[in-house]
Image (cartoon, rainbow, N blue to C red):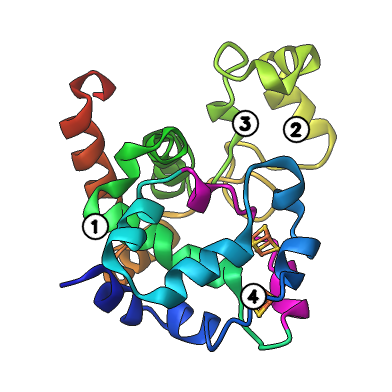
């Protein structure tokens, strides 16, 4: 199947790109364009040309990983396109075909999968106090180390429910809900996607295991 055919199977692509007139409004409003070498208008023009070699270059580039998914572009496009959704479809094809391993930003998929992705399936949370080890997350700052080491008492003080059953923030998620969550990932292709990210990352660099 060609890249274009894969993209056309994704409703986000079909709905996100009707006809781009290259006006640049999406780029003007895009916060990511302010900080990175990133231009959603250019992405839309490349995708609209339907050229396989250009699509492959895009799937192998850092470009598709810069978007912050804020969807500001959706609100302003005069043609009712949504570059942010087209980017989602491109990312999916990049992951499914292993093209993500060709860019520095793309290779970070394995880290995201092993932190946020695995956390969801294991604990039911994207981010959980247990998984933010200060040694691995210096960006959290020095105060975090104290919070991390005193988390049980601290979370009790703010009315959270760390490691406990029942309601409340950071509670233990019950087994039935966890199974439901995992089945959603199985049925919607999320689990397969995680396997592919592992497979391609390991094939390109066995040291990732
Ligand atoms: S705002 Fe819409 S029409 Fe204009 S460049 Fe962006 S996607 Fe194309
Ligand atoms: S969704 Fe992505 S492309 Fe659209 S404005 Fe936000 S960062 Fe930019």
| Residue occupied by mark 1 | 192
From the image, state whether disc 2 or disc 4 is nearer to you: 4
Where is residue 158? Give x, y as percent.
84, 37
Residue in front for this viewpoint, 199 or 31: 31
Counting residues from the start of the chain, the first of labels 4 and 1 encountered is 4
Q: Disc 1 on helix, strand or loop?
A: helix
- Residue 125 appears in the rendering: no
From the image, state whether disc 3 or disc 1 is nearer to you: 1
* Quarter occupied by residue 90: bottom left
Counting residues from the start of the chain, the first of labels 1 and 2 encountered is 2
> Cα distance, mark 1 to mark 2?
35 Å
Question: Marks 2 and 4: CB-CB under 8 Å?
Answer: no
| Residue occupied by mark 3 | 129
- What residue span does the magenta drawing correspond to? 62-77
Q: Disc 4 on helix, strand or loop?
A: loop
The quadrant the C terminus occupies is: top left
Q: Disc 3 on helix, strand or loop?
A: helix
Residue 68 within the magenta-colored segment of the rendering:
yes
| Residue occupied by mark 4 | 22
From the image, state whether disc 1 or disc 2 is nearer to you: 1
Where is residue 79? Give x, y as percent.
66, 88
Q: Disc 2 on helix, strand or loop?
A: helix
Above or below — where is 45 with respect to 153?
A: below
| Residue occupied by mark 2 | 155
Residue in front for this viewpoint, 72 or 144: 72
Above or below — where is 47 with respect to 124?
A: below
From the image, state whether disc 3 or disc 4 is nearer to you: 4
Where is residue 62? Give x, y as percent.
48, 43
């Amino acid at each position: 199947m060609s890249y274009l055919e894969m993209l056309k199977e994704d409703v986000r692509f079909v709905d996100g790109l009707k006809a781009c007139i290259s006006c640049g409004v999406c780029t003007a409003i895009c916060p990511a364009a302010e900080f990175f070498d990133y231009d959603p208008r250019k992405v839309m023009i490349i995708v609209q040309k339907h050229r396989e070699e250009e699509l492959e270059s895009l799937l192998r580039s850092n470009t598709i990983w810069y978007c912050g998914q804020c969807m500001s572009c959706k609100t302003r496009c005069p043609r009712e396109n949504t570059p942010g959704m087209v980017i989602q479809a491109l990312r999916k094809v990049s992951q499914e075909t292993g093209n993500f391993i060709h860019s520095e930003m793309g290779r970070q998929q394995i880290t995201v999968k092993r932190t946020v992705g695995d956390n969801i399936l294991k604990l039911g949370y994207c981010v959980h106090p247990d998984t933010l080890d200060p040694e691995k997350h210096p960006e959290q700052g020095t105060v975090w180390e104290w919070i991390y080491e005193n988390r049980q008492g601290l979370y009790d003080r703010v009315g959270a429910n760390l490691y406990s059953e029942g309601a409340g923030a950071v509670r233990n998620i019950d087994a039935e809900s966890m199974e439901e969550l995992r089945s959603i990932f199985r049925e919607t292709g999320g689990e397969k996607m995680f396997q592919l990210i592992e497979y391609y990352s390991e094939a390109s660099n066995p040291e990732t295991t």
